[in-house]
Amino acid sequence: MRMRTRNLLTAVAAGYLAGTAPSAAVVARLKTGGSVDLRSAGSGNPGGLNAVRLLGRRAGAAVMVGDVGKGVIACVVGRRIAGDLGAHLAGVAAVTGHCYPLWTGFRGGKGVATSFGQCLSTFPVYAPVDIAVAVAVARWPGLRRPTLTSVAASSTVWLLASVLWWRRGGPNLWGPHPTVSLPLANAATVSIILAKARRRAQRERPDEFGSRR
């Protein structure tokens, strides 16, 4: 029991460390020599979309691949250390590390790309649907905040699908066999992402969320 607990805690720590890897900062430094800091330029988000706007499509794609890779690596390492549950815990920890990295005063990204890496590793059968839902909602005409709505919609569907897969014991390609750990881990990740998105939206447009106190 003690060994099991230690392995799970190690998986969480490894996942968090993977999530804090500064993929956006590395790409920005290589592209601009350090003259652009994605955490203070543009939208202030060290993620792929901000990188596309400021550094170009190739640099933005590199940031996205790096962020997705952090989620994948975290889950793979977590699974090796502590089995299927370790993969789920490490995935959540990676998203937490990406959103709240200790080394930068907890100023991180939105966690969406890293959560997709988690999905690729722990719920791969759903990954294509996740992309389709996110793109379809983001392109829906007339939305006031398409990015925020897309994240909320895709996250919600991802969570509901994981509950369905767990209850039915559906196939999961190379991912762990669906257990209750799948929807619980996804629920934790969704909570982190939506809370971060809401806080960012509240900072940008406080009038939409009521006056600050």
Image (cartoon, rainbow, N blue to C red):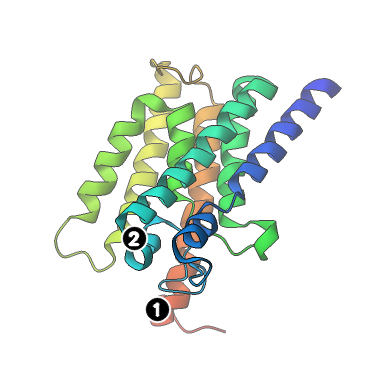
In percent of the image, x 46 and y 37: which residue is there? 117
Q: Residue furthest right?
A: 2
Q: Is residue 188 above or below residue 72?
A: below
Q: Earlier in the sequence, mark 1 or mark 2?
A: 2
The secondary element bearing badge 1 is classed as loop
Seen in the image, is 132 located left or right of residue 123?
left
Amino acid type, mark 1 = Arg
Look at the image and tell me whether residue 109 can be seen. no
Percent of width and height locating residue 158:
38, 38
Whether residue 125 sits left or right of residue 102 in the image: it is left
Q: Residues within 10 Å of mark 2 (few under 14, many from 20)?
A: some
Q: Is residue 191 above or below residue 207?
A: above
Q: Position of residue 204 (x, y in %)?
A: 42, 77
Tell me the residue that label 2 is attached to.
52
Q: Residue at x 52, y 68 (%)?
A: 39
* Quadrant housing residue 209: bottom left
Count of numbered badges drawn on the protein: 2
Q: Which residue is mark 1?
A: 205
Name the residue: 45% across, 61% down.
Answer: 197
In the picture, which quadrant includes the N terminus? top right
Q: Is residue 12 visible?
A: yes
For residue 123, which quarter of the picture?
top left
